[in-house]
Amino acid sequence: DGARRTDNSRLGNLLGGDFFLRIVAPRTPFVAHADEHGHVHVHGHTLNGSKFFTWGQKGEGRFWQDFLAGGGGDGARHGDYAELQTGVAPTQMNTFALPAGSSRQWTEWFATFDGNASALHADDYDVAVREVAAWIGGGVPPERVAAMDAFFRRHADDAVRDADVVHRGLPWGALHQ
């Protein structure tokens, strides 16, 4: 139709906002970032609600990008900032009741690897997706994730001893009645 399209798979192209992603089965859901040398950070999960947030490249958004990437508000370009989030619902606006005494459990994983920089930054987005998916198939195959999940399920209700607690967090998200 002649409309200008932007490759939003490139962080520097995003003008700002929230992006909610749905991954079609049977592909392993993942979010990945590859630097210019082909070093990849990848986050895999079994959930189908994925969110990508960036402050964007204009005005105040650019300031926040630099500030959150380690800048001191000096006006210099310090980098890009993004948040990658997953959840049990497709978006943060979707909610559901969690009955008293029940729970929701899943396993997420984070990993890094060195991939083929040319493939990861190819003009054809599917080439980059295949590069990451191929590594996941050998680096973190579904069987390994299932084994991790089974381990966590077996130990989910184990009593936590005070001696095992490294840090007690704040009650953000606690139920107030």
Image (cartoon, helix red, strand yellow):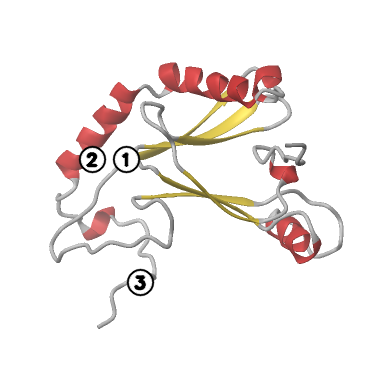
Q: Which residue is mark 2?
A: 152
Q: Give the crowd class for mark 2: few <14, some 14-19, many >=20 residues within 10 Å.
A: some
Mark sitting earlier along the chain (2/1): 1
Query: Which disc is residue 107 wearing?
Result: 1
- Residue at (69, 32) in percent of width and height: 35
Q: CA distance from mark 2 to mark 1?
A: 8 Å
The type of residue carrying mark 3 is: Pro
Residue 128 drawn at (x, y percent): 61, 23
Mark sitting earlier along the chain (1/3): 1
Which element type, helix, strand or loop, lies under badge 3? loop
Foreground residue, 32 or 21?
Answer: 21
Badge 3 vs badge 2, beta-carbon distance below 8 Å: no
Q: CA distance from mark 3 to mark 2?
A: 23 Å
The type of residue carrying mark 2 is: Phe
Mark sitting earlier along the chain (3/2): 2
Q: Left or right of 151: which side holds 37?
A: right
Can you say which quadrant of the picture contains the N terminus? Answer: top right
Badge 2 vs badge 1, beta-carbon distance below 8 Å: yes
Q: Which residue is mark 3?
A: 171
- Residue at (25, 28) in percent of width and height: 147
Q: CA distance from mark 1 to mark 3?
A: 22 Å
Residue 134 drawn at (x, y percent): 49, 17
Foreground residue, 106 or 24?
Answer: 24
Q: Give the crowd class for mark 3: few <14, some 14-19, many >=20 residues within 10 Å.
A: few
